[in-house]
Amino acid sequence: MFPLSTTMEASYECFAPTRIVMCYTKIHPSKISQMIYYENMLTFSTNVRCEDCTSPQHFWANQYLHNPNRDSAGYIGLDEQEKKTMLSFRGTVNFKNLLNDANAVSEYYTFPETSMKVNVHKGFHQAYLSFQAQVRQSFKNLLTTRIKDPKLYTLAVVGHSLGGSIAAFAALDVFSFGSSNTGLVPSTFGLPHKNVYLHTYGQLATGDKAFAQQLYNIFEKKATIANVARVTNS
């Protein structure tokens, strides 16, 4: 991992067949402490050594997520004192993960609740789809059995490297099944859109420019663009 005190930029690195497009925006200094909190939580789902990372006392990993075929992995966690829930996805740690990284052929991705199709990195997309049902069910179980009032909680979807790309797909998925504008719709488990955050660290190129722009548009419409950050070394 890397110290966020020296990191002040975020972007979406857009995947394209012939080029990489970098789209930078500044992170407001007030967000840094929040992002350090999320970075610390990545230590549960990665074997990357982070001597500066410390786990909050009241945080616990509720459910481990894993698909053995692609070795996609992560966890769902909860901090009841801070009223935070988290979906965290592991980065590249083995040969199966490297195969996902190398599968850079583009495939169509249709944004939830729209008919818009864009090009995304096939390996990363398939890595998320390999345990999408597990993510959905585990998240539903957490919000409906452990948390009394989901409207009071935030959800951070985070990931490092490969896990960052998986997190992007997971966050978009949450908007279609696990949250709503008001947080009052029973089928969405009571989590408001505005409480959903996507923070990634060293995220690999995930989709084309249209994918990156539409992701921002969805957060801007349903939550706020300030809820999205892709952190890179500066």
Image (spheres, helix red, strand yellow):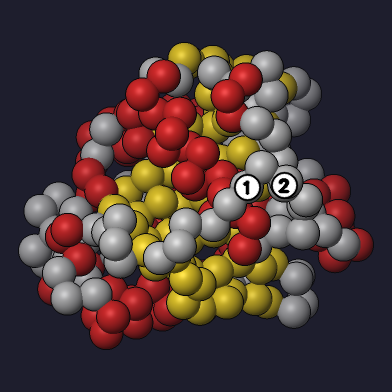
Judging depth in this view, the residue of 218 and 83 nearest the camera is 83
Residues marked 1 and 2 touching at CB (< 8 Å): yes
Identify which residue is drawn at 66% across, 42% down. 52
Q: With respect to residue 104, does 58 lie above or below?
A: below
Q: Which residue is mark 2?
A: 50
Identify which residue is drawn at 41% across, 19% down. 29
Q: With respect to residue 150, does 122 lie above or below?
A: above
Residue 55 relative to residue 130: left or right:
left
Q: Which residue is mark 1?
A: 53
Q: With respect to residue 228, does 177 lie above or below?
A: below
Q: With respect to residue 94, does 171 lie above or below?
A: above
Amino acid of disc 2 = Cys
Q: Is residue 227 visible?
A: yes
3D distance between C-alphas at marks 1 and 2: 5 Å
Outermost residue toward the right?
95
Q: Position of residue 117 (x, y in %)?
A: 47, 43
Q: Position of residue 33 (x, y in %)?
A: 43, 34
Q: Position of residue 222 (x, y in %)?
A: 23, 41
Identify which residue is drawn at 91% across, 62% down. 95
How packed is label 1: few (under 14 Cα within 10 Å), some, or many (20 or more)?
A: some
